[in-house]
Every structure is written in C-alpha cells, then in structure tokens.
Amino acid sequence: MSAIEYVEKVLADVKACSPGQDEFYQAAEEVLHSLVPLLEKEPKYEENGILERIVIPERSMIFRVSWVDDAGKVQTNFGYRIQFNSAIGPYKGGLRYHPSVNLGIIKFLGFEQIFKNSLTGLQIGGGKGGSNFDPKGKSNNEVMRFCQAFMTELYRHIGETKDIPAGDIGVGAREIGYLYGQFKKITGSFEGVLTGKGLNWGGSLTRTEATGYGSVYFAQNILKKNGLDIKGMRCAVSGSGNVATYTIQKLKEVGAIPVTCSDSRGMIYHEKGIDVTTLKAVKEVGRQSLEAYAELHEDAVYTPVHSYPEDRNAVWDVPCDIAFPSATQNELNLEDAKALHKHGCKLVNEGANMPSTLEAVEYMQSNGILFGPAKAANAGGVAVSQLEMSQNASMERWSFEEVDEKLHKIMKNIFDAAYNTSVEFGKEGNLVMGANIAGFRKVADSMIDEGAI
Ligand code: NDP
C-alpha cells in the first residue's frame, strides 16, 4: 500500500467509527495528510500499525456530573476525560467547560495535544477533558458545586505521574482552585495533580501568561527567519480570555499594536491599541461582555456578532500585519483568509486550538501568508504547565524571569524543530508539515519501542 493509500484507509476508518465527530476528523485529516512524506520514507510506521493506533484514545471516560443549583434544583451535565496517548509521558491537557463540548471536540483537542506536547521536548503525553457545563451566568457557589461534582468522578482517573489536567476555555484560576480543593478532600493528598494552580498552593509564576506570551515569541521566531520585525506591526487578535489577553499584553511590551479583541458576543476595534487594564477589568474581573470596554473608551468601536454575516468573523476584516486567532476552533474560514490576504496580512499565528479551517490554511499557505500552526504556536501553556510539575516534584520555586527565560528557549526549540523538519522534507517554511512530522516521530518511535499495546 502506498503512503497516501495507508493514510486514506485510516481516515476512512476514523470517519466510520466516529460518526458526527467532525472536529476530530478535521484534526486527524490535517495531521495524517502531512505525514505522507515521512510514511513514504519510513515503512516501519505502517508495519507497526502506528496510524491505526494513534487515532484511538488509550482510554475514554464519559461520566455523569450532577449538582444542585442555587434554586435547589438538580442539574446534570456530561463529563469527559480522554487519555489519548502516554507513549512519552503521563497524559497532560486541559479541561474545557463550554456548552458546545461533546466527545468529538474533546477528542480533537486530545489528539492535537499528543503532538503539541511532544514538540515541547518535554516528557508529557496527550489528554483532554471537560464538560458541556456553561460557567457563564452561574454564581460562584454553583461553579464550586459543579467543580466538586466533576472532581468526585475525575479524581480516580488522575494523578501526578498518571494524568495531570489543566485549564482551557471556561476553566481558569477559580475553577482549578475548586477542582484542586475537592481532589485534596477526597484523596487526602497534596500533590501536583493539576496545573494552573494558585501561587500560594503550588502554582508556577508565568503559567497564567504562558500561552499568550509563548504565541508572541513563536511569531517573533517566524518573523526573524523572514527578515521582519514585530515592532510597529498592527495585530488583529480574536478572543478576550486567557490566551488573547496575554498575547495582547506581550504584543504591547514588544512594541507591536494590538488593535482588536473579541468575545462570543462581539468585537472591539481600538485603533490606538487595546488597553490591557480595561480588558482585564471587563473580562477577567467583571466577567462582562466587551460592550463594557467600548463604554469606557469613546474612541473604541464595538461590533456585535449579530450585526455581521453569520459565516464571517469581523476581526479578520480589520487591516493588520499579523492575525492572532486566539478564541476557539474554526473561527477563521476561507473567506476570512481571503480578507486578511486582501489587506496585506503577512502572518497568521494560531493562539487557539485549530482556529483555522483546512481550506483557510491551504489558501494562506498557497498565497504567501506566513503561518504558525496552533500545536507549535500555542504550546507555551502546556510547556510551562510541565515546568509547574517539575517545581512541584522538586519542591522548588522558580522566579518569573527564570520561567520566562525557559519559555523563550522552548518556543525557539519548537520553531527550530518544525522549521528544520520542513527543510528535511523539502518544504522549507511549511510549519504545519514540520510541526506534525516532528511531533509525530517522537511519539511513534516510542510506541514502537514500547511494543504492541
Ligand atoms: P478562555 O475561556 O479564557 O477565553 C475564551 C475566549 O474565546 C473568550 O473571549 C470567549 O468569549 C471566546 N470564545 C469561546 N468560545 C467562543 C465561540 N464559540 N465563539 C466566539 N468566541 C468564543 O479560554 P482560553 O483563552 O484559555 O482559550 C482560548 C483558545 O486557546 C482555545 O482554543 C483553547 O483550547 C486554546 N488554548 C488555551 C491554552 C491555555 O493555556 N489557556 C493553551 C493552549 C491553547 P466569551 O468571553 O464571550 O465566552
């Protein structure tokens, strides 16, 4: 069987065995297609059935989470933890709380996590979890009771050398605190079983900032390779959560001008640059809509989602030099990519997981837009999570500067691995292919070493 036939056969099996899991299929298609040149060169992966194995999680937990709301009514949600691949280390990946969460979304995120974690050069396997619980509009007590109920099942599946969850959409410092408290209550063990912890109880400096900062460091590596400087560049950022906020903060620090941010209800265009203090006050502290940002800055323009065509994202119509999609999956489609190209965008650097559709990526690559794929560009978060695990295990505490320095090096190493692999396979600068092959190779070789399990 040729390499492409092998890939198509595995993808057909994925489709047949996971009906309705569109996002998972999309992630599998992107990764497997870009592996073809490696599979042509190295028949051992087909001989050892690596693709057939790598697309199936080692273990999937789906569980009921029942909790009582403030009105005394019993509410029930789905809980998920997918332990996808532990060939190179314990499962590691965040928990997402969002009403759109289903098995396909968690599988796509867990699958991506395998290769991202491998790329960091650290010993961490891939996993992901979450729930269709929506923290929006819930009281603190409701969020606490939900997190306690979620952990009451999850605790039996995780451990500091087994599976170490973290945050993702809808799971920030507050939720990690409630989850950790319940883990400790049930097990009686104070261990580094979650990352993104508070600084008083085992968290790492720089973890909050890591994904956004790392995304900017990755973009700087791409620009440098192409003889460009980020200083003075106008940047369109989507999202206004953890990743977007700290992307914007770092962009300002390095002399770029982030002019947009967005949430599920609308977007802000602020020509002179997003004010980070206001952004944090509105989203991190107030948990409000971005409309409140425009009320505090007369020169900022608010565009509600409902005033825009359903299949377009207003952020990508803003002329920019760099785009940082940092909200959610499939938020940048083919039409958005064309708009970015028309306005002279030089680089799209993915902060969110799989924010660009396959068609958009193809268009950007064939029209000369530089492209930083998510599993490389946003790997700073999980990398610093692993540094949090190291500090917990050795009972040490590193300074902000120390961790930031390590993050810088890790992002440079990821860029070098992806870039050098793209050169090795004759597609210089194709970081999608480079990141996928570099991430896959280490995991696949480990799977071969560890036998047919
Ligand atoms: P947050 O929950 O902190 O923020 C998410 C942001 O995206 C919010 O502004 C939210 O708007 C917006 N958003 C969420 N869903 C949608 C949607 N369906 N349509 C439009 N906007 C939406 O999450 P993070 O910042 O942590 O995560 C953002 C992305 O980055 C995700 O893809 C995540 O998987 C990825 N990522 C996160 C890492 C981390 O360390 N946190 C690490 C690596 C990747 P609203 O406020 O209205 O809900």
Image: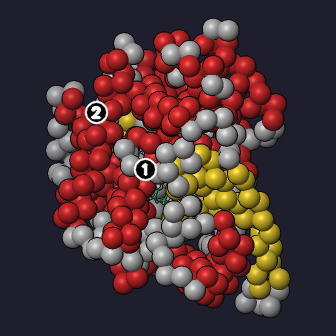
Give me the residue at 60% from left, 13% from top. 3
Q: In which quarter of the view is residue 5 placed?
A: top right
Where is 231 relative to 55, above or below? Answer: below
Image spot of residue 205 (x, y percent):
30, 70
- Which residue is labeled 2 in the image? 416
Image spot of residue 256 (x, y percent):
22, 49
Q: In which quarter of the view is residue 156 placed?
A: bottom right
Image spot of residue 324 (x, y percent):
39, 45
Determine whether the residue tagged by mark 2 lies in a helix, strand or loop: helix
What is the number of callouts on the image? 2
Image spot of residue 339 (x, y percent):
45, 31
- Crowd around label 2: few <14 · some 14–19 · many ≥20 (10 Å): some
- Which residue is labeled 1 in the image? 123
Give me the residue at 30% from left, 25% from top. 420
Which quadrant does the C terminus fall into? top right
Query: With 225 as the anchor, is 338 left or right in this view?
Result: right
Give me the residue at 80% from left, 69% from top. 64
